[in-house]
Amino acid sequence: NKVDGVTVGEGSVLYEEKDVQDGLVIDNRAILTESDLQAALSKGGKVKLGGDITLSSYLTVSKDVTLDLNEKDITTEGLAFYVTGGTFTITGTGNVNAANGTSQPAVWAATNGKVNIQGGSFYVGLDDEKKTNSCIYSTGGQIEIDGGTFANAGGTYGGGGIFNVKNNTQGKIIINKVDGVTVGEGSVLYEEK
């Protein structure tokens, strides 16, 4: 085995990274699949996407996790991320495309869940009645917006806006950095009553 002038004896390994604590690599594989991503999110730490991922179901976040979208896309027909605990930080560029045909947001913070969005583009489609979905939703959790692009498909007004806090909950959505946040044309800010 010869690599750029370096000879390595048979059975030797130059470098091997297994099950890294920060979630970047699991068993020598980049995060390329839904199951790998859920495993990394369940562990907590830093997670970096290695490719586009299509979800068959939403991913639950219950620990402190920083997800670098790394110019990759996450696509799902329903909810993408359900945050029940810990702090879920989303960074980097990439897209989270959710809720085509369902009434689900891209990111949902439940009680005890915290979300900090520093980057990425978030988009939700219309539900099956062609009504607007919320893009970012809180039912008791705290969401801080420090960057990113947010849009929904428009449609008829049906109870969803870009940022939505369910009424009678302790949920909060705090927009810290207005100049780093873009809301798509035709999208509305909304508070559920």
Image (cartoon, rainbow, N blue to C red):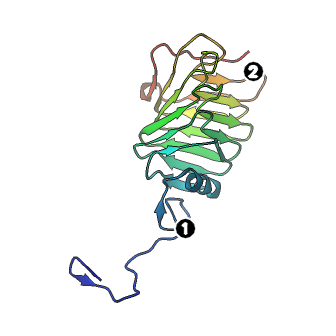
Q: Nearer the viewer, mark 1 or mark 2?
A: 1
Residue annotated with mark 1: 19
Whichever of labels 1 and 2 marks the residue nearer the N terminus, that label is: 1
Marks 1 and 2, how far apart at CA: 42 Å
Question: Most extreme residue toward the top, as rendered?
Answer: 156
Work out which quarter of the rendered image holds the N terminus and state it: bottom left
Question: Most extreme residue toward the right, as rendered?
Answer: 168
Quarter of the image where one finds residue 132: top right
Q: Residue at image x 42%, y 47%? A: 70
Residue 142: image location, x then y, percent: 66, 34
Residue annotated with mark 2: 167
Q: Is residue 146 left or right of residue 131?
A: left
Up-down: is 110 above or below 155?
Answer: below
Q: Nearer the viewer, residue 33 or 192?
A: 33
Quarter of the image where one finds residue 2: bottom left
Counting other residues with Cα less than 10 Å from the Cα at mark 2, is it few (<14), some (14-19), or many (20 or more)? few
Question: Most extreme residue toward the bottom, as rendered?
Answer: 9
Kindly indicate whether the residue at mark 2 contacts the one at mark 1 (C-beta within 8 angstroms): no
Secondary structure under the numbered disc 2 in the rendered image? loop
Residue 77: image location, x then y, percent: 58, 33
Counting other residues with Cα less than 10 Å from the Cα at mark 1, is it few (<14), some (14-19), or many (20 or more)? few
